[in-house]
Image: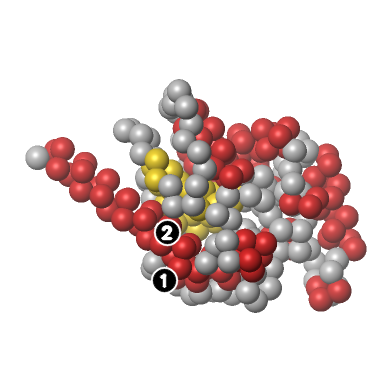
Amino acid sequence: MITLATVRQDIVSCTRCPRLRTYCERVGREKRKAYRNETYWTKPVPGFGDPQARIVLVGLAPAAHGANRTGRNFTGDGAGGSGDFLMKALHANRLANQPFSRGIDDGLMLTDAWICAAVRCAPPANKPTPREIANCHPHLRAEIDALPNVRVYVALGRIAYDACWRLMADRGVKPKKRPPFEHGGVYRTPGAPTIVAAYHPSRQNTNTGRLTAGMLRSALATAVKEIVTRREDREGAKR
């Protein structure tokens, strides 16, 4: 079985997308004024969290001055950014030990959750191309395969939702008609992880009220309930 350490090394050393590699490195040289004295990570960003996680959250991609700077997904995009917004919801559901994500040494720990992304390099304007998404999919699949207990995918946004269905296709699950993406949607397939869909906690969504704190808390609560329900179903089947 492939290990998380091997997957991490493969992700960090990846050079499949020259446009993204050039952009990430340029951002790391030019920097944002607030971070001018910091050394940016600039490499592809691996996932992080609990290696025994039953819930995997899939985001879009690192932020140029967030994870591309800190080397950790949903980390470092400022107070009130997508990282803090997500961690508050995870903390409320006892999946994180603190309601913020500011830096890689901030003490954040996840329980029963793993956070990764469909694309591992920050894309210009937060818009990876279809080819770049496809190039990165093997990293997502390998990382999921290295997590032995996954029961639920939480898709944060449409691109992540599509990535989760590609993971399902990798398992041979190919519905005749894929359900449309909608926040709070729950999609169950026997013998495969459940997909829970949610809007991405980008500032564009949270500042406009399209995604509220309560909505994200509720989506994660659904994911937690799902792993409990699936465990009870398996135990009941054994009796």
Q: CA distance from mark 1 to mark 2?
A: 9 Å
Name the element at disc 1.
helix
Q: Mark 2: few, some, or many residues within 10 Å (few <14, many ≥20)? A: many
| Residue type for callout 2 | Leu
Asked if one can make out residue 226 in the rendered structure from this viewpoint, the answer is yes
Asked if one can make out residue 154 in the rendered structure from this viewpoint, the answer is no
Q: How many marks?
A: 2
The residue closer to the viewer here, 1 or 178, is 178
Residue at figure coordinates x 52%, y 67% from the top left: 212
| Residue 228 rendering spot, x and y as whole percentages | 27, 53
| Residue 111 rendering spot, x and y as whole percentages | 41, 62
| Residue 152 rendering spot, x and y as whole percentages | 40, 46
Residue under pointer 1: 92
| Residue 42 rendering spot, x and y as whole percentages | 77, 56
Seen in the picture, residue 130 relative to 93 is either above or below; the reply is: above
Determine which quarter of the picture holds residue 143.
Answer: top right
Q: Say how the picture is coloured.
A: secondary structure
Residue at figure coordinates x 43%, y 43% from the top left: 195
Seen in the picture, residue 63 relative to 164 is either above or below; the reply is: below
| Residue type for callout 1 | Ala
Locate residue 28 relative to residue 2 in the image: left or right: right
The residue closer to the viewer here, 156 or 141, is 156
Name the element at disc 2.
helix
> Which circle's residue, 1 or 2, is located before the other in the chain?
1
Return the mark for residue 220.
2
Q: Are marks 1 and 2 in contact (CB under 8 Å)?
A: yes
Residue at figure coordinates x 88%, y 55% from the top left: 26
Residue at figure coordinates x 76%, y 59% from the top left: 64
**The C terminus lies in which quarter of the figure?**
top left
Locate residue 82 relative to residue 221 in the image: left or right: right
Locate residue 28 relative to residue 201 in the image: left or right: right
